[in-house]
Each structure stands twice: as structure tokens, then as C-alpha cells.
Image: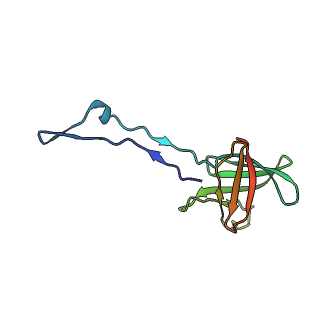
Amino acid sequence: MRKLILIGGVLALAACNGEAEVTEEEAAPAEEVVEVASVVGTYNGTSDDGSEWTATINEDGTSDVTVDGEVVDSATWRTNEEGLTCFTGVPDEGEEAGEEECYTFGEVGEDGSVEVTGADGESQTVIKVS
């Protein structure tokens, strides 16, 4: 997952007789463009026990896993300094937050398949549906 990146324009100054000259185009404030993390979206997969699940990773830093129409896990997510997508489970009332788990998301294939690799090196192929 990649960090949100603000892309701005660069103002160029041309020297003329020792004074800087700025054109109207260069003087206009640069527009901010925010890149949405590539992991944002909805994924389908199958657990080790054969249960089909859907995971939704939202732009607002939250995510949910649903099995048979019921949310079974909620988490917050972030992209760390190494570019890994890290999830921390949202604890139930009175419980402590779990440990952060980080993953590498591969490129999305033409068929929507994405290889997701955990810190332990184990990989799973999931389908990005949106």
C-alpha cells in the first residue's frame, strides 16, 4: 500500500536584470492531487477451512472482513515506511488491540488476482473485485 502522495507543481523563476519574473500561470497555486492507495478496494478469498470471505479496505483507513454477510473482523490499516500494508484489529470493548500484521500486495492481474504475502513469507492469492 503506498502512502498518500501530494503532487504539486514547481514554480519557475526567470531572472531578468537581477529581478525574478513570475508569469500568471506560475503564480497560480498548484492543485493538490491525492493518490489513493492501490490496496483500497474489495477482495474475495477462501480461508483454510474453505469459508468464502470478502474483505473491504476503505480509503479512510478502516477495513472489514465479512463471512456469510456477517462482519467477523474489523481493523485499521496504514502503509508503513517500507511500503507494506499493515492492519491492526479493532478490539472489542475491554480488550487490548492486537499486534500489527503487515503484508505485501502484488500487482493486480488481468483477472483481478492479487498475491498477498505476509511477514512470515506465506502467500495467498485473492481476487480484487473493485
- Across the whole image, how many numbered discs are drawn on residues? 0
47 left or right of 28 in image = right
Between 121 and 100, the one lying in front of the other is 121
Residue 80 placement: quadrant: bottom right
Q: How is the image coloured?
A: rainbow
Which residue is at the far top? 24
Quadrant containing the C terminus is top right
Residue 42 x, y percent position in the rendering: 72, 45
**Can the viewer see residue 57?**
yes
Between 11 and 112, the one lying in front of the other is 112
106 left or right of 94 in image = left
Residue 91 x, y percent position in the rendering: 72, 62
Please report the residue visible at 53 percent of the width from the left and 62 percent of the height from the top.
81
Between 123 and 29, the one lying in front of the other is 123
Which residue is at the far front? 110
Residue 73 x, y percent position in the rendering: 76, 56
Please report the residue visible at 86 percent of the width from the left and 48 percent of the height from the top.
68
Residue 77 placement: quadrant: bottom right
Between 44 and 32, the one lying in front of the other is 44
Which residue is at the far left? 17
In the displayed structure, 65 sits above or below 97; it is above
Please report the residue visible at 42 percent of the width from the left and 37 percent of the height from the top.
31
**Can the viewer see residue 89?**
no
Residue 117 x, y percent position in the rendering: 69, 61
